[in-house]
Structures are given as structure tokens and as C-alpha cells.
Amino acid sequence: MTHRPYVIDELISAKAIAARIEDLARDISSEFADTNKLVVVGLLRGSFVFIADLVRELSLPVEVDFLEASSYGDGMESSREVRILKDLRGQIEGRDVLIVEDIVDTGHTLTHVTKLLKSRKPARMQTIALLDKPARREVDFKASYTGFEIPDEFVVGYGIDFAQRNRNLPYIGKVRFEDES
């Protein structure tokens, strides 16, 4: 598959991300201070870098599990149809759960996943998104915790990809196609 040439402009530095994660982890650790173990559910694949850094900053006992939901494929636009590609391994009934997402765009994925996991009767459940793009919202969804609100730009880096590229960038960057001014 051939892609149009593009460049990536830094939008959020690695240093800013690290500082924000420390703040978020402090708030989450405070909220769940009475938990015997927090089940941190990462939404694959985009959240894997965020979840790794977040759990290292939490001052709580944690268990990590993953769920893979897809609404994008290799494109830049959401298909709005959420499919579960990989479900949780463990049970969450009666347990404290934190769902970790890389970015809230249209809101369809987190709305779908939240409803699915609520039906499994967790004791408490919260959501966290590294990035929030409210200009693109199509459903009424707001994460319990948000790292950064960003404009309606296509972004990559820090686990977020464009057709499986650029996940390894240590910062969040804005994709700009070379044939656009």
C-alpha cells in the first residue's frame, strides 16, 4: 500500500507527557486508594505505551489486562463500527477497573467498551484517555481523566499509529501531508 508523503510536527513533547502522567497517576491513586487491586484495562494497540508509563506511576496494586477494539483499520477516519478483536482474559465482576485509551475521537469506541464492561458488573469503573479531540465527538462521552485536549488534527506517536507506523515516537506529533500547504 502506497502512502502520500508526510511529515510529523511535534504537538506534545515527551517531557510534557511524562509530567502529565505523573499528575494523572496521583489523582487515580488517590481515587482508588482503598482498592485491594486496580484492574487496568488497556485498549490495544494505541494505549500500550501510555499504559506502561501510567502503571509505573500508580501507587496502587495493579493488574493489567487488554482488550482490542477497532474502528479505524488503516485509515485516518473512524468507521464508527466498533469491533472487539480481543477480549479480556480475566474477570472484572466486583473489581475496580480503569479503562485506558490513547485518544477519544468520535467517542464510539469508549462508549461501546464502557457499556460492554459495565455489563460485567465491576465494583467501580473509570476511564482515562491520553488525548481528547472534542471537535470530532459524535456521541456524548467524556473520559473520567484526560491527559491533553487537542485540536482536530491527525496525530501519531507515543503508541498511536498511522497505518502501523510512527508508534515508536516518544512524543505526540501532528501528521502533515507534503502536498498540503
Image (cartoon, rainbow, N blue to C red):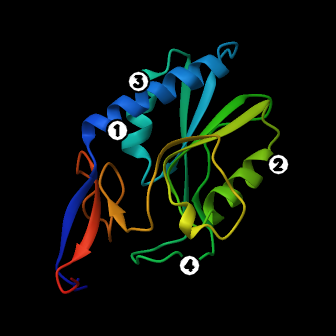
Q: Is residue 164 left or right of residue 82?
A: left
Percent x, y for residue 132? 51, 54
Q: Is residue 87 above or below residue 154?
A: above
Q: Nearer the viewer, mark 1 or mark 4?
A: 1
For residue 87, above or below residue 4: above
Find out whether the residues at labels 3 and 2 contact each other: C-beta distance under 8 Å: no
Marks 1/4: CA–CA distance: 28 Å
The disc at residue 153 is none
**Residue under label 3:** 56
Tag on residue 17?
Answer: 1
Q: Position of residue 1 (x, y in %)?
A: 25, 85
- Which of labels 2 and 1 is toward the front? 1
Find the distance from the CA under tag 3 to the CA under tag 2. Answer: 29 Å
First in sequence: mark 2 or mark 1? 1
Q: Nearer the viewer, residue 86 or 178?
A: 178
Earlier-in-chain disc, 1 versus 4: 1
Q: CA distance from mark 4 to mark 3?
A: 33 Å
Q: Earlier in the sequence, mark 4 or mark 2?
A: 4
Q: Which residue is mark 4?
A: 79
Q: Secondary structure at mark 4?
A: loop
